[in-house]
Amino acid sequence: MFASLLHRIHRPALRLAAVGSALLLQGCRLALFDPKGDIGNQERHLILLSTGLMLLVVIPVIALTLYFFWRYRATNTEATYAPEWSHSTTIEVVVWTIPCVIVAVLAVLIWRSTHALDPYKALASDRPPVKVEVVALNWKWLFIYPDYGIATVNELVIPAHTPIEFHLTADSLMNSFFIPRLGSQVYAMAGMETRLHLIADEVGTYAGRSSAYSGAGFSGMRFDTIAVNDADFADWIKRTRTSSPALTADGYHALTAPSEHEPARKFGKVEPGLFEHVVDQYMPKAAGGEICGPSDTVARIPSVLDPQHAETLPLTSPAKD
């Protein structure tokens, strides 16, 4: 029943929302209404449909309010005067049925879209995803490409038409990762890992930003997302490896220092396990630098988070005792 009803009002609601948006936003180009990826397109569709459904109530109410003001003004002697009137079954049915139907339709819509746009859900594609590990720093973004052993600061280069699998965390303050033209935002929190799947359908440069206030340098916490073709992406990986310095333990700790409007830069080598160690640094530690936990998951804190022991604790993936 709801599916049939949703189908009936789907197109009119979209048309109504699209016309309203075009009138209100004429001359403007808002990123959310100009998506360049599949997730962004689905979210725009959801915004327009939800807006159209709500306008089905808002517009008639405003129109009827203005009509009643005019129809029943004091100088209009032709209007019916009924000071004892108090109830109308017809009006009650209308004012309750329409909102209930709209709420029911929105509930079905939200249920479907919540599952379809789950940020943890991998995108269907005949291409394997490119994995990018994201660390929110103060006030900059560190992007690690674990499959290629490189990293960048405040610049995200991705292949177009290829799913991107983001793993996100924060080194200190909670932040929010957002590329408006590609889709969903997701929070990055210290000691936790969140995920996001996005895809760019076109080659181009798209603005990325932090969408959660995190202090004095928040306004400069921006980055360019550069979607390129496969050949250019492979060439960029090769050039970054050969012409950029390595991200050392001291280099990472220098990055963690607060800075504003950090310029983009690249690192041609990153030791494996850096992202996992950033997440694990807030785990309780026992004497000797061990993470407290079950015996089969105990790992030793690496030098990247403990530069004083850089010589005795090499920067490698955690090893079981």
Image: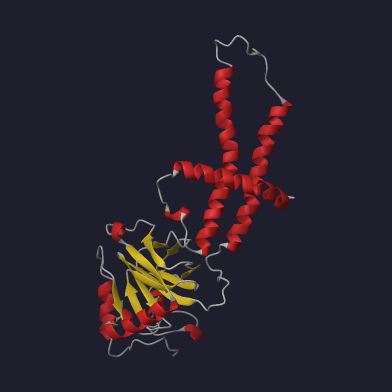
Q: Position of residue 180 (x, y in %)?
A: 43, 59
Q: Position of residue 146 (x, y in %)?
A: 41, 81
Whether residue 133 sits left or right of residue 108 in the image: it is: left
As displayed, is residue 65 above or below residue 162?
Answer: above
255, 304: nearer the viewer: 255
Q: Position of residue 49 (x, y in %)?
A: 58, 49
Quadrant into which the C terminus falls: bottom left
User: Residue 179, located in which quarter of the rendered image?
Assistant: bottom left
Residue, x 60% and y 45% (percent of image)?
13
In-front residue for pair 162/223? 162
Please name whichever residue, 172 or 110, is drawn nearer the observer in this view of the structure.
Answer: 110
Against 36, residue 165 (above or below) is below
Along the line of sight, the residue nearer the viewer: 252 or 202? 202
289 relative to 88, above or below = below
Residue 268 in sight from this viewpoint: no
| Number of numbered discs visible in the structure rendering | 0
